[in-house]
Amino acid sequence: MKLDHIDTPAALIDIARMQKNIARMQGRMNALGVAFRPHVKTTKCIDVVRAQIAAGARGITVSTLKEAEAFFAAGVDDILYAVSIVPAKLPRALALRRQGCDLKLVVDNPTAAAAVAAFGDQHGETFEVWIEVDTDGHRSGITPEQDTLLEVGRILHDNGVTVGGVMTHAGSSYELHTPQALAALAEQERAGCVRAAQRLRDAGIPCPAVSVGSTPTALAVGQLEGVTEVRAGVYVFFDLVMHNVGVCALEDIALSVLATVIGHQADKGWAILDAGWMAMSRDRGTSRQSHDFGYGQPCLLNGTPLAGYVVSGANQEHGILSLTWATGDEGGHADDIAQRFPIGMKLRILPNHACATGAQFPEYHAVSPEGNSVEWRRFQGW
Amino acid sequence: MKLDHIDTPAALIDIARMQKNIARMQGRMNALGVAFRPHVKTTKCIDVVRAQIAAGARGITVSTLKEAEAFFAAGVDDILYAVSIVPAKLPRALALRRQGCDLKLVVDNPTAAAAVAAFGDQHGETFEVWIEVDTDGHRSGITPEQDTLLEVGRILHDNGVTVGGVMTHAGSSYELHTPQALAALAEQERAGCVRAAQRLRDAGIPCPAVSVGSTPTALAVGQLEGVTEVRAGVYVFFDLVMHNVGVCALEDIALSVLATVIGHQADKGWAILDAGWMAMSRDRGTSRQSHDFGYGQPCLLNGTPLAGYVVSGANQEHGILSLTWATGDEGGHADDIAQRFPIGMKLRILPNHACATGAQFPEYHAVSPEGNSVEWRRFQGW
């Protein structure tokens, strides 16, 4: 299908940009001598994941058991479920392993570790668990020097659970914006995770995998001594937050929302779009960054960004396109808004956060360099 | 199914609260002597809409053609599609009308009006169109005194399109928080829409329907002279934004997200939940209001709010529960966080914005007063 025939709003993937992003990350990981395990929470789409695996990815990372179930059903069997396991979810994890899925769980506390051990013992299943390490204080995990690290390792190891490794995610990298700061955090992430692995090994607990990563640190890191694999998700599409972090150009962003002009408020300098927050998502991640892109960066159908314009406001199914911040008191005012953006005109809007925007759609339209599109399904829920 | 057996995160509807909210709004509309046409964009769920119709609603309002198609397939035939029509979407509108759906379109500009007229003429279909009126400057529509109003009316009327009425939505009511301000805006919404209808009628253009509404104005309005119907959506669930606006108590909020405690960062006073922004949505609508609820208000399983606690941060599948703003520099610190919220404990989180949070889920779990739940499907996309 040609772009012109797709009903709006729609989520478009620029296949050429996506393949370039995949090749860039995989190439870096190959050069650094580590395996790459993409985080598929960004896309929840088997077509995208097949492209990542074809490029050299080894296994995947998931954020929900539904992702694990869906991707295992689609033929991926090496899966890291990177959220500390809720004991009540162990039956679903067991079911996956019994079907042959090499599912690895994550814990960051003694209670969950003991629950996995007890459940495994009860059902005669040797679970594999990776211990989550906190290397930047932004979320969950055990810091490398905490006693709890060895306590959790022992609970697992002494009770018949395979300790598969340690993993960390320096998510605070999203708050940075210089190569120096990113490289420093990447080294902190690496060193902290390697140290945690070493402490476990010194205590007699095997720890084969040392897994680190976030898109910014993966693209900034100088060396990965002691690391066995890297995880990253949003790099496959990139987005405006990543652009502000400094790890991609606007022209690298592979996800956009196709929208149509449906009206104007000419006296305010507004064109009204049929893509509101239901399409763009409520993510305003660039609002705390150096350049606030509102609800997204408008581009022409061919992908050229419309410099100075922004989606400055959004209702559920209405977006407001204006010169930057024309909705506020300070912004500019486009006198020619109705002439420049006539009713029925289609635009592509680059999103703040590809993971959040993609989640608003049941499918992507993957667009080839020739302008033809095919539908790639994605799924929702837990 | 009992609450304890539902996998987390899950979207819960408290049926008793929902029925109370429906009865409250319908009772008001009955007393004011107007028809009520609920906006189903909030729920996209036929089970909820059946309850609204059973209580007396006449017809529905939709924000997408997918909603129109889904609810028509489920037996609802009086449907107002309340977003200015994109000419390219007219074939889908025609298909619905040809199947017997009494679908009413909306326009707010001459170009779209002429496109509907031309398309109707070409296909021998008499479309019904309502004209969108702007009564508060917050989004789209034609202001009551603009010449464009009569121009659009004439394009439709003179070219064989039925002008079914005028409609307006005072969405800026979400920014208010006193009964006086809400009542004043409600009167402005009413008077502006009635005035627009009068101008059309004075010009010889029939205008039977005069449709106004938003949840806050519908609950604040004193009289509705000249109005034939009211529309509102979020009232069916309410949410924390509506609580701050002042039109509901916390105990009226019928939608919550069931979550499980998966970890702690005790030194920071954090409990980590398995409900992050993918479950709560990225909507931070209360951040600009008198009380900022973060990503949501935690409650016990029985619905009792945990005063002072908040979901202060969110990653995609991780929420951070803390004493109010403990993630910032100012907030409190709960020394007993791990004891008070042990691993595996389930909580219910009230959302900022029910329309946005509901959209993150493929289904609701509707919970009866006895604590039993049934699954109610909702749909996604356009």
Image (tube, coloured by chain):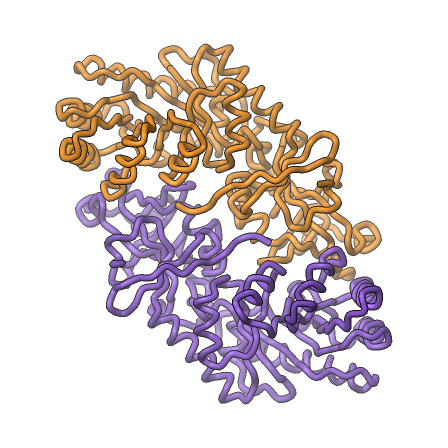
Chain colours: A orange, B purple
Residue visible at 55% across and 62% down in the picture: B70
In the displayed structure image, the side of residue B352 where residue A109 appears, left or right: left
The correct choice, above or below, for A140 with respect to B310 in the image is: above
In the displayed structure image, the side of residue B96 where residue A100 appears, left or right: left
In the rendered image, the quadrant that contains the C terminus of chain A is top left
Residue visible at 36% across and 39% down in the picture: A65
Q: Position of residue A253 (x, y in %)?
A: 62, 33
Between residue B62 and residue A112, name the one nearer to us: B62
The correct choice, above or below, for A378 with respect to B375 in the image is: above
Q: Residue furthest front?
A: B99
Residue B102 appears in which quarter of the rendering?
Answer: bottom right
Residue visible at 33% across and 20% down in the picture: A193
Q: Position of residue B327 (x, y in %)?
A: 36, 44
Between residue A43 and residue A224, name the one nearer to us: A43
Between residue B42 and residue B55, name the one nearer to us: B55
The correct choice, above or below, for B289 with respect to A246 in the image is: below
Residue visible at 69% across and 43% down in the picture: A348
In the rendered image, the quadrant that contains the N terminus of chain A is top right
User: How many numbered callouts?
Assistant: 0
Residue A248 appears in which quarter of the rendering?
Answer: top right
The answer to whether any part of residue A185 appears in the image is no
The answer to whether any part of residue A167 appears in the image is yes
Residue A230 appears in which quarter of the rendering?
Answer: top left
Q: Position of residue A268 (x, y in %)?
A: 74, 59
Q: Position of residue B339 (x, y in %)?
A: 17, 46
